[in-house]
């Protein structure tokens, strides 16, 4: 577990970068405002101001203050219909359509919003929204309002790490245009009180996947799914990222998911009753992050693991039930920076080819007592970048 803090950090960091890039791309693809022609709609401006006024601004946990550009009450006066206000399309975090002036993008991530999320929020009157990012705020364990379904044009929805709790409304599944859905990391950040976690019981994971057929990013980590992984997920060829960590998943993980042609990121760690194995990998695979740590994944590692030349970030197999020898083809993976094989049932020597990996920053081999690790003596001094090393109970 000493390695876990680092891989968890890398998971959040890498996935946040990935989702951020999707949101940047989404915003860049939205029609931009013509700066010479203010087009902001008064009613949408008022809706934005009322939404902001629903919350306190508490920046104790975040330095960002996106909505401060909305704060001048002498300019942004709700009572006089905001007729003297500046163009809301130029406010921080707001994106408008250049032709219609409607608000189509709202990025208030890390904006210090603090308070209970109103079930009748004026946010839901912005029915032209395509991109909504409210991540990294604190909504005090509010439920996600069912009126989220009114935002039927949404393609990107990120409510991650914002202290939502309770049932995920079934109306989320009606947002059929969604490409990115991230509800991860809500609930009690300490993980102590599971009652605060989001739950997906009124809406099954299978129905959610069925209805949202355009998904490229699905992140429900720390949502209580209490579900098997639907085979249907392996038919979603547009998927690029799957993050389902600590979700109470059980049963067999469909191996064909790993073979999705566009998949770059898959992480299902800390699902203690989730079984599975690693399938044959093709050289065309685009995977660059793979974690099945703390699950019941088992079997031998396929020699075709060496085909994952795109694996540049993490291979995390900690605390699984993998056995047999580590294939020599693992030496082909010379680009990744983090490898964790701790606490499995591997046997035999480490392959000499592993010495090809000289870019590692973190390496976990603890509790692998059956491994003859003589090769470590000549390998480790060559890894100048190594910052984290776990070798507990390994004989050197």
Image (tube, rainbow, N blue to C red):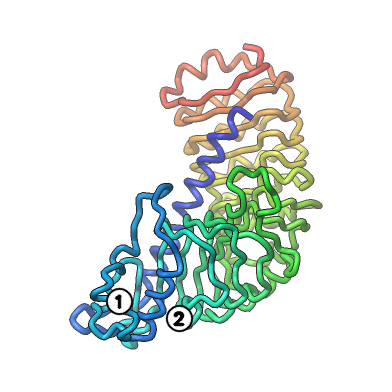
Q: Residue at x 66, y 37 (%)?
A: 317
Q: Is residue 160 above or below residue 54?
A: above
Residue extending farthest to the front is 79
Q: Residue furthest bottom?
A: 100
| Numbered disc 2: secondary structure | loop
Q: Residue 119 in the image: x percent, y percent?
A: 57, 73
Report helix, strand or loop for mark 1.
helix
Identify the residue position indicated by label 2 in the image.
Answer: 126
Q: Earlier in the sequence, mark 2 or mark 1?
A: 1
Asked whether 252 or 128 is in front, the reply is 128
Nearer to the camera, 302 or 32? 32
Give how far across and how far down residue 148 sits, in percent: 57, 75
In which quadrant of the rendered view does residue 277 lie?
Answer: top right
Q: In this view of the protein, which residue sits in the foreground, 367 or 39?
A: 39
The picture quadrant where one finds residue 392 is top right
Asked if residue 82 lies left or right of residue 4, the reply is left
Image quarter where the C terminus lies is top right
Q: Quadrant of residue 108?
A: bottom left
Decide: few, some or many residues near mark 1? Use Cα within 10 Å; few <14, some 14-19, many ≥20.
many
Instruction: Identify the residue at horizontal 60%, vertical 34% (top origin).
Output: 4
Q: Where is mark 1, residue-wise?
A: 88
State the residue at coordinates (39%, 52%). 59
């Amino acid at each position: 577990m000493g390695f876990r803090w680092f891989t968890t950090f890398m998971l959040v960091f890498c996935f946040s970068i990935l989702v951020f890039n999707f949101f940047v791309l989404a915003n860049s693809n939205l029609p931009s405002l013509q700066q010479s022609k203010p087009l902001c709609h008064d009613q949408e401006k008022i809706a934005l101001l009322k939404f902001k006024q629903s919350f306190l601004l508490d920046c104790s946990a975040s330095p960002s203050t996106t909505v401060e550009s909305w704060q001048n009450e002498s300019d942004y006066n709700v009572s006089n219909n905001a007729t003297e206000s500046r163009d809301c399309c130029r406010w921080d975090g707001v994106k408008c359509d250049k032709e219609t002036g409607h608000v189509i993008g709202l990025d208030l991530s890390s904006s210090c919003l603090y308070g209970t999320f109103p079930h009748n929020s004026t946010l839901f009157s912005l029915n032209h929204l395509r991109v909504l990012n409210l991540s990294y705020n604190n909504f005090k364990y509010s439920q996600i309002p069912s009126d989220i379904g009114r935002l039927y044009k949404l393609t990107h929805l990120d409510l991650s790490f914002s202290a939502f709790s309770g049932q995920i409304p079934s109306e989320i599944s009606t947002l059929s245009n969604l490409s990115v859905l991230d509800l991860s990391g809500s609930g009690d950040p300490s993980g102590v009180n599971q009652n605060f976690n989001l739950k997906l019981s009124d809406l099954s994971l299978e129905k959610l996947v069925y209805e949202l057929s355009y998904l490229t990013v699905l992140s429900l980590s720390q949502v209580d799914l209490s579900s098997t992984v639907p085979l249907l997920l392996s038919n979603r060829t547009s998927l690029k990222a799957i993050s389902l960590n600590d979700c109470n998943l059980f049963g067999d993980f469909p191996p064909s998911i790993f073979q999705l042609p566009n998949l770059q990121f898959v992480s299902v760690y800390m699902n203690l009753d989730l079984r599975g194995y690693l399938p044959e990998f093709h050289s065309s695979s685009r995977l660059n992050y793979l974690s099945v740590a703390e699950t019941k994944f088992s079997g031998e590692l396929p020699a075709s693991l060496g085909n994952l030349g795109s694996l540049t970030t993490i291979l995390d197999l900690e605390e699984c039930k993998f056995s047999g020898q580590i294939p020599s083809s693992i030496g082909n993976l010379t680009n990744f920076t983090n490898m964790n094989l701790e606490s499995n049932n591997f046997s035999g020597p480490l392959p000499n080819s592993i010495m090809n990996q000289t870019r590692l920053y973190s390496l976990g081999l603890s509790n692998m007592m059956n491994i003859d690790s003589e090769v470590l003596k000549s390998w480790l001094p060559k890894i100048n970048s190594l910052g984290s090393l776990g070798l507990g109970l390994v004989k050197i």
